[in-house]
Image (tube, grey):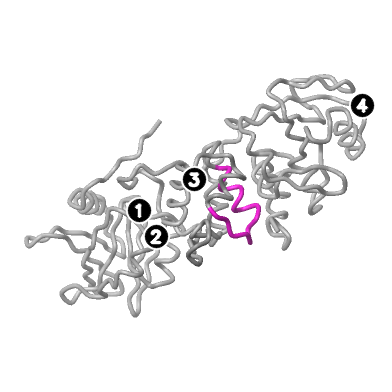
């Protein structure tokens, strides 16, 4: 497994950036970075028969606070470009909106002049920032992400998130700090004297969901057991399963759940999360290795059941969970997933 590299000094950051541009080809635009004898470095760009020079300002910790720091537009007559080891997508989006030139060691590069625009997306994540960033999408921490995405219009206090996710205050605090730093969540102050002096509101729904989509490891978070039944009526099958195992133990997902929320494709089978740590016995079905029309899914983390809904008498997991689960399977699962996401009532 490839490990990301940590850059923990501005000198190392500048040096790595200069090296990264040494192998650029000669096609337009030509981009180079050079260390200066007086210290620091500058970026040189040749495009449209013009030459541009930018003063590189290295920073170790990407943050939205940069907008409040009154950064100079010019440094010794040269426009400024901000440099980091890694810039999260949400923060990079805000940099673009503000018109701030920026770059990172993973290939991201945004330069805007009066007559020229260059916007390169990162090629991967070889480098990361020096802080020990918590994994936003681990089994436990994704409970917080799911809560924000499943109730996209709600403002949360840290205490409310603790009660909802059953995670420790320390872990919640770290995740919230990271979400705010990356621009996914907005921290708002409330009047003194109230138990919690800050509330947290989702700011970038699509960017956060896309980040989770990229990091989701379906096979690591579930165990799937397939069953074969004689019925071809999926509504009847789902109802029989609910009644046999107990309504509070079965929460439907994927095609059947999406069809109840926003029909787009014909469900090929019924799949549901079950509240159990053991493979359940289903009296009306037999286990099969493949080809079953009933999938029972045992989750590695119970957080799946913290954000649920009921539709037409069936318990479903959240829209966001249905979406992520559909992306992992064939039989037009991704098509149904994207149609559900584009629906105006998605996660509302």
In space, the residues marked 2 and 3 are separated at their CA atoms by 33 Å
* Residue 120 tag number: 2
Which comes before the other along the chain, label 1 or label 4?
A: 1
In space, the residues marked 1 and 4 are separated at their CA atoms by 54 Å
Q: In terms of secondary structure, where does tag 1 sit? A: loop
In space, the residues marked 3 and 1 are separated at their CA atoms by 31 Å
Instruction: Single out the mark in the foreground, 3 or 1.
Output: 3
Which residue is rendered at x = 34% and y = 70% of the image? Answer: 68
Instruction: Single out the mark in the foreground, 4 or 2.
Output: 4
Give percent across and percent down for residue 7: 26, 45
Which residue is rendered at x = 52% and y = 50% of the image? Answer: 211
Which comes before the other along the chain, label 2 or label 3?
A: 2
* Residue 298 tag number: none
Label 4 sits on residue: 230
Q: In terms of secondary structure, where does tag 4 sit? A: loop
Give percent across and percent down for residue 293: 82, 31
Instruction: Single out the mark in the foreground, 2 or 3.
Output: 3
Q: Are marks 1 and 2 in contact (CB under 8 Å)?
A: yes
Most foreground residue, 326 or 31: 326
**Picture quarter with the N terminus:** top left
Instruction: Single out the mark in the foreground, 4 or 3.
Output: 3
Which comes before the other along the chain, label 4 or label 3?
A: 3
Classed neighbour count for the residue bearing mark 1: other residues with Cα under 10 Å, few (<14), some (14–19), many (≥20)? many
Classed neighbour count for the residue bearing mark 3: other residues with Cα under 10 Å, few (<14), some (14–19), many (≥20)? many
Label 3 sits on residue: 172
Which comes before the other along the chain, label 1 or label 2?
A: 1
Q: Are marks 4 and 3 in contact (CB under 8 Å)?
A: no
Residue extent of the magenta highlight: 142-157
In space, the residues marked 1 and 2 are separated at their CA atoms by 7 Å
């Amino acid at each position: 497994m490839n490990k990301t590299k940590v850059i923990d000094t501005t000198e190392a950051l500048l040096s790595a950036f200069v090296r990264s541009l040494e192998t650029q080809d000669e096609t337009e635009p030509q981009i180079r970075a050079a260390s200066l004898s007086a210290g620091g470095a500058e970026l040189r760009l040749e495009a449209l028969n013009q030459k541009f020079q930018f003063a590189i300002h290295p920073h170790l910790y990407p943050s939205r606070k940069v907008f409040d720091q009154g950064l100079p537009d010019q440094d010794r007559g040269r426009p400024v470009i901000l440099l980091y080891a890694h810039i999260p997508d949400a923060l990079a989006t805000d940099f673009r909106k503000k018109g701030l030139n920026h770059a990172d060691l993973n290939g991201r590069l945004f330069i805007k002049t009066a007559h020229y625009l260059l916007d390169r997306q990162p090629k991967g994540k070889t480098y990361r920032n020096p802080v020990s960033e918590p994994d936003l999408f681990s089994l436990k921490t994704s409970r917080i992400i799911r809560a924000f995405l499943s109730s996209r219009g709600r403002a949360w206090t840290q205490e409310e998130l603790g009660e909802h996710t059953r995670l420790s205050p320390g872990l919640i605090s770290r995740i919230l700090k990271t979400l705010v730093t990356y621009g996914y969540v907005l921290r708002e102050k409330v009047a003194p004297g109230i138990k919690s002096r800050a509330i947290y509101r989702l700011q970038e729904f699509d960017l956060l969901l896309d980040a989770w989509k990229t990091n989701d490891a379906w096979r690591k978070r579930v165990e799937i057991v397939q069953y074969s039944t004689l019925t071809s009526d999926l509504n009847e099958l789902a109802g029989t399963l609910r009644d046999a195992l107990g309504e509070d133990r079965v929460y439907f997902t994927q095609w059947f759940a999406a069809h109840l929320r926003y029909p787009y494709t014909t469900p090929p089978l019924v799949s549901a999360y079950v509240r159990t740590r053991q493979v359940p016995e289903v009296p009306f079905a037999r286990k099969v290795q493949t080809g079953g029309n009933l999938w029972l899914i045992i989750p590695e983390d119970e957080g799946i059941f913290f954000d649920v809904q009921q539709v037409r008498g069936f318990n479903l997991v959240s829209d966001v969970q249905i979406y992520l689960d559909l992306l992992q399977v064939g039989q037009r699962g991704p098509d149904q997933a994207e149609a559900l996401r584009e629906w105006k009532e998605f996660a509302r």
